[in-house]
Amino acid sequence: MREARLSLDESVTVEQALARYPYFKNIAWSTYEDKDGKRMVEAVCDLDVAATCREVNQPGLKLARRDVARDFFVARFVVDGLPAKVRALEAQHVTQCSSGGKLVMADPKYLRAIYNREQVRIFCLEGLNCPGQDASPQAVQGQ
């Protein structure tokens, strides 16, 4: 699967496209079968938040990240048939909060931006990442 090429840019493999993205620090790959028996491949890519949010001042970034455990992108692909064909399923940005909650934003444009090595906008606003105890429950999924 890592050697697959997508129509986004057939000159590079999926692995190369993710590895050359300047805002990823680490990429972990996994393969599994979903409930319908489809073979899924997932790349979890740790995000270099300081580089991605460089327009936010340091005190503001520290405040925004105060209750954040991890920021990452998840790219999921489906492997169909024999010979195997790969298609992109979804890409999403996830902010994992220290409380166990998650902020999740899926966007079909994420994968294209990653392939083009463009900066992807994430939750960089001061104080909006992982609201504290007095925040409304709707603000954070999974709390």
Image: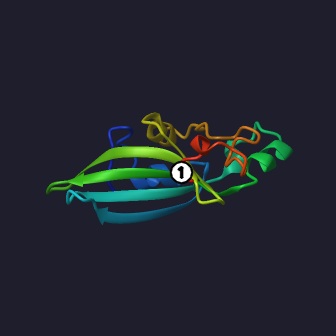
Residue 10, image x and y in percent? 34, 42
Point 78% across, 38% down: residue = 56
Q: Residue furthest left?
A: 82
Residue 33, image x and y in percent? 27, 63
Q: Mark 1, residues whose alpha carbon is within 10 Å: few (<14), some, or many (≥20)?
A: few
Residue 88, image x and y in percent? 34, 45
Q: Amino acid at mark 1?
A: Arg
Give the SS element for disc 1: loop
Is residue 26 rendered to the left or right of residue 15?
right
Residue 17, image x and y in percent? 46, 49
Counting the numbered discs, the total is: 1
Q: Is residue 2 visible?
A: no
Which residue in the structure is indicated by mark 1? 20
Depth order, front residue of 109/137: 137
Depth order, front residue of 100/1: 100
Is residue 128 rendered to the left or right of residue 27?
right
Quadrant assignment, res 117: top right
Point 61% across, 49% down: residue = 23
